[in-house]
Image (cartoon, grey):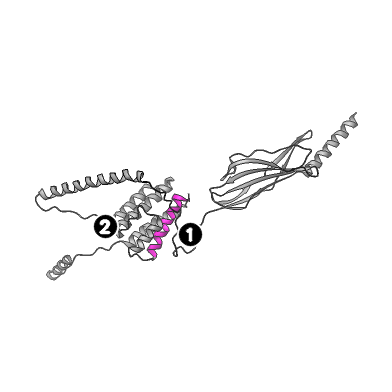
Amino acid sequence: MKRLYILTFLLVSIISSSYCQEVKVTASIDTSRIFIGDQVHYSITIDQPSGIKLTVPVLKDTLLKNIDILAGPVIDSSGIKDGRFKIIQKYLISSFDSGFYQIPPVYAELKNESGLKRFYSDYTQLEVMRVKIAPADTALKIFDIIKPYRAPVTLNEILPWVLLVAILGVIIWFAIRYIRKLKLTKKGIEIVSDPDPAHIIAFRELEKLKEEQLWQKGEIKNYYTKLTEILRQYLENRFKVFSLELTTSETLEALIKSGFKKDTSYNLLKTILTGADLVKFAKHKPEPMENESHFQSSWDFVLATKLEETIPEKAVGKEKSGEGIL
């Protein structure tokens, strides 16, 4: 009886061993290189004999950090051939962070009288690349981050706004007339002080932005939004380029039409606005050195393009006459 038990145990072990040698688990991806946001299939294939039952864990949420599972698994099996068949599990995956990822092996389990046996696949590699927004020499042509979409506007949508603008226009017109009447009734000469020059306003706002330390607090998008608003307001005050409602490419085109040359200052501005667009629209996460560099470039742009102050001719004459008296 004891010999019969030993022979049975050996026979089960030999059969399990032969099955184990015939089980093959593989993992693969449709392509090893994708761009941020692309969707591909991650497939797990099990090639096994028909006489055993294997268990494969179901993957949920993520394959690993930064690789998300969007859907699945979708299970498919091929027909039995020569006593074998295949089971394929497919997952739809994507990633929104660039980098080179090595996905760990997956496994299938076999449970029988002799215990638990696992069969592992190899590692799977995936490279997630960033989208190249512009060509190598961006001085030749400016590319939008995202092409603006203009939906058709109906008359019913426009009419309330037209009426609102008309009412506001009438109110402003009466307000201007009323203010002018008040000025005429006042005695004496009213001294009107000139506003600060465009570069003084820009430097003041840049100093405020620096003191807020937004990017140091993790408010990267807010930091670049305020930085570009300061530059766009400076362009309006200095060159009469009203760019607050324009895209980056439209702003640069309007600046060239105003007589600005494609020089070092132009390239500085283009680099700042393009870098800010990457943060605001493409979820780019710049390094601290890059944040400081964009701030310094903004300062240098204003400094290089500011309107030089001139001394009035009368003041120059007084200075010369003063020198003669001395």
Find disc 2 in the rendering and name its residue.
Answer: 197
- Asked which secondary structure carries label 2, the reply is loop
Q: Quadrant of residue 303?
A: bottom left
Give the x, y percent position of residue 29.
64, 49
Query: Mark on residue 134?
Result: 1
Q: In the image shown, does 305 or 171 lie closer to the viewer? A: 171
Mark 2 vs mark 1: give the one in front.
Answer: 1
In the rendered image of this protein, does residue 202 appear above or below residue 313?
above
Locate the N terminus by quadrant. Answer: top right
The kind of residue on which mark 1 rests is Ala
Locate the C terminus by quadrant. Answer: bottom left
The answer to whether residue 266 is magenta is: yes
Give the x, y percent position of residue 61.
58, 40
> Residue 289 vs residue 202: left or right?
right
Q: Residue furthest top?
A: 1
Name which residue lies at 47% across and 64% down: 137
Name which residue lies at 16% across and 66% down: 314
Q: In the image shown, does 68 or 198 lie closer to the viewer? A: 68
Q: Earlier in the sequence, mark 2 or mark 1?
A: 1
The answer to whether residue 279 is magenta is: yes
Q: Is residue 238 something that shows in the picture?
A: yes
How many residues crowd around disc 1 within 10 Å: few (fewer than 14), some, or many (20 or more)? some
The kind of residue on which mark 2 rests is Pro
Q: Residue furthest left?
A: 187
- Asked which secondary structure carries label 1, the reply is loop
Q: Residue furthest front?
A: 155
Q: Which residues are magenta?
A: 264-282
Query: Mark on residue 172?
Result: none
Query: Magenta region, mostly helix, strand or loop?
Result: helix
How many residues crowd around disc 2 within 10 Å: few (fewer than 14), some, or many (20 or more)? some
